[in-house]
C-alpha cells in the first residue's frame, strides 16, 4: 500500500542469539519455586531482567532509562529527532511457573531488531524506542498490564494502594520495595504527540498459527477481560455431626457456580465468550469441617465489550440464585475490567504488506489474551504480530516457540518498523480507528 516493496528486506535475525537471550532471561527465576520460570511483577528478579535489557541496549549505543512505573525504554536516535517515536517491545515479568516466552519473546525480538539496525547501519527518520514493560501479568495483583496501563494514563497513584497480592502487599508497597516511587507514576504517562506508532511481537498463546502452519499472525483485535472475586459465606461445622439438610456449605455452592460459569460460556448466546474460575480458596480448609467460606476468582473474556459485561453481570445474578437456594451469602467484587480493543486497520495493513514483501505467510487473527498493546493503543496507534505457540500452550513450563519461528517473526518486526517509519514520514496519517470495540 505504500510502495515499500523495493526497500523491504530481511536483515538476518539470528535464531542463536534469540535463543541465547530467551535462555538468559529464563535463568532469572525464583529459586525453589517449582518448574518453569517464576519472575513476578515488581520483584527484584523482574528488575534484574530489566537491567539485563538495559545492558545490551546501552552496549549497542542506545540511550536507556527506566520510568516511574518501572518500564524500561531504550531509544535509538532518528535522523529527524523532532519526529515522534516508533516503539516496539513487550514485558519481562511472568506468572508463577511460567514458560520462557510469554512477553519475553517480544523483548528479545526488540533487542535483536536493535542489534540488526546497528549491524546494518540502518537509518530511520523517527527515533525508535525499544520497550520492556513492567508488571504485565495480572497473576500477582489481579490487574494485568500495570506498566502499560500507567503509560497509557489508564491508572495512576490513587489505584496502587488498592491492589494487593496474596501476602497482603499492595502494588504501591511492592513498587517501593524495588526502588520505584508510586506517587510519581503519572510522570511515566506517554504524551500522544510523543509517539507515532507501536508494534508488539508476542507468542500466540493459542493454536491457530500452528494448526494452519502459518509463521506469523497479524492481530486485528484483543479480547477484553472482566475479573471478579466471588465470596461465598456459609457456616463451618462438623462433617460428621451436621446432617446434610442442615448445612450451609460454601463448597457445594462454589462447585455449582464453577459449573454455572462453564455452562454460561458454552450456551449459544455466548459464542466466543471464555469464562474461567482459575482459583478457588476454601476456609477453614479442613478435611473434617464443612467449608464455611469459599472465594472464587473468575475471568470473563470476550472480543465483544457488551457481551463481556452482560455475561459477567448474568453470572453474578445467577450465582446469587444458587446461593439463595443453598442458604449461603454471596458478595461479588470486580477486581479489574478492560474493554476489548480493535487495533487500527492502517497499521495492520502496513504490517501485512511487509510480511507479503518479505515472503512471510501470515494470517489475521484475534487475541484471546490481553496485552500491553491493548493499553498503549489508547495513546498511540498499535499493531501486534504473533508467532506460533507449540500446542497452543502458554502460562506453563512447556510453553515453547522455536528459535527459527522467533527469527521469522523478528524479521517481520524489524522490517515492519522500518515500513512504519516510511509510512509516518508522509503527510499526517489518519487517526487510529478508536480504542474501544
Ligand atoms: Zn504476555
Image: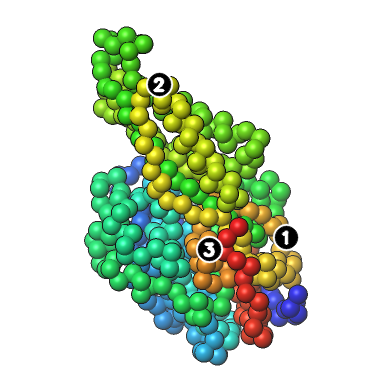
Decide: few, some or many residues near mark 3? Use Cα within 10 Å; few <14, some 14-19, many ≥20: many
Tell me the element at label 3: helix
Which one is nearer the viewer's eye here, 99 or 374?
374
Total tally of numbered discs in the picture: 3
Residue at the disc numbered 1:
361
| The N terminus, quarter of image | bottom right
Marks 2,3: beta carbons within 8 A: no
Residue 157 visible in rendering? yes
Above or below for 81 versus 15: below
Tell me the element at label 2: loop
- Between disc 3 and disc 1, the foreground one is 3
**Residue name at image x 52 percent, y 89 percent:** 82
Residue at the disc numbered 3:
373
- Between disc 2 and disc 3, the foreground one is 2
Mark 2 CB near ligand 1 (8 Å cut): no
**Residue 297 percent coordinates (x, y):** 41, 39
**Residue name at image x 66 percent, y 35 percent:** 268
Residue at the disc numbered 2:
326
**Residue 433 percent coordinates (x, y):** 64, 67
Amino acid at each position: 500500500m505504500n510502495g515499500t516493496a523495493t526497500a523491504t528486506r530481511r536483515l538476518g535475525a539470528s535464531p542463536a542469539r534469540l535463543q541465547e537471550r530467551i535462555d538468559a532471561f529464563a535463568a532469572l527465576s525464583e529459586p525453589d519455586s517449582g518448574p518453569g520460570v517464576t519472575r513476578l511483577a515488581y520483584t527484584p528478579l523482574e528488575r534484574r531482567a530489566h537491567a539485563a535489557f538495559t545492558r545490551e541496549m546501552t552496549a549497542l549505543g542506545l540511550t536507556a532509562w527506566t520510568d516511574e512505573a518501572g518500564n524500561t525504554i531504550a531509544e535509538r536516535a532518528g535522523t529527524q529527532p523532532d519526529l515522534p517515536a516508533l516503539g516496539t517491545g513487550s514485558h519481562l515479568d511472568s506468572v508463577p511457573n511460567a514458560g520462557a516466552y510469554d512477553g519475553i519473546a517480544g523483548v528479545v525480538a526488540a533487542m535483536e531488531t536493535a542489534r540488526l539496525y546497528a549491524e546494518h547501519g540502518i537509518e530511520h527518520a523517527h527515533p525508535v524506542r525499544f520497550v520492556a514493560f513492567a508488571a504485565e501479568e495480572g497473576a500477582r495483583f489481579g490487574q494485568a498490564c500495570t506498566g502499560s496501563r500507567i503509560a497509557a494514563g489508564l491508572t495512576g497513584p490513587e489505584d496502587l494502594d488498592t491492589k494487593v497480592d496474596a501476602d497482603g502487599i499492595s502494588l504501591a508497597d511492592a513498587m517501593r520495595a524495588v526502588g520505584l516511587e508510586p506517587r510519581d507514576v503519572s510522570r511515566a504517562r506517554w504524551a500522544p504527540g510523543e509517539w507515532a506508532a507501536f508494534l508488539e511481537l508476542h507468542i500466540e498463546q493459542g493454536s491457530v498459527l500452528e494448526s494452519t502452519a502459518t509463521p506469523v499472525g497479524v492481530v486485528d483485535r484483543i479480547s477484553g477481560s472482566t475479573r471478579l472475586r466471588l465470596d461465598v459465606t456459609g457456616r463451618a461445622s462438623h462433617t460428621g455431626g451436621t446432617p446434610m439438610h442442615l448445612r450451609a456449605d460454601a463448597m457445594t455452592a462454589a462447585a455449582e457456580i464453577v459449573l454455572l460459569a462453564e455452562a454460561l460460556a458454552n450456551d449459544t448466546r455466548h459464542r466466543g465468550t471464555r469464562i474461567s474460575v482459575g482459583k478457588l480458596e476454601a476456609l477453614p480448609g479442613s478435611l473434617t469441617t464443612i467449608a464455611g467460606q469459599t472465594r472464587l476468582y473468575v475471568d470473563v473474556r470476550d472480543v465483544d465489550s457488551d457481551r463481556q459485561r452482560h455475561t459477567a453481570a448474568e453470572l453474578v445474578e445467577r450465582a446469587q440464585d444458587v446461593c439463595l437456594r443453598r442458604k449461603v451469602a454471596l458478595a461479588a467484587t470486580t477486581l479489574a475490567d478492560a474493554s476489548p480493543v480493535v487495533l487500527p486497520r492502517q497499521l495492520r495493513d502496513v504490517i501485512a504488506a511487509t510480511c507479503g514483501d518479505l515472503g512471510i505467510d501470515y494470517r489475521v487473527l484475534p487475541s484471546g489474551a490481553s496485552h500491553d498493546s491493548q493499553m498503549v493503543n489508547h495513546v498511540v496507534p498499535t499493531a501486534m504480530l504473533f508467532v506460533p505457540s507449540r500446542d497452543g500452550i502458554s502460562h506453563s513450563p512447556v510453553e515453547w516457540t522455536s528459535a527459527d519461528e522467533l527469527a521469522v517473526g523478528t524479521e517481520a518486526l524489524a522490517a515492519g518498523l522500518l515500513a512504519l517509519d516510511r509510512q509516518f514520514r508522509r503527510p499526517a496519517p489518519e487517526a487510529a480507528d478508536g480504542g474501544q470495540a
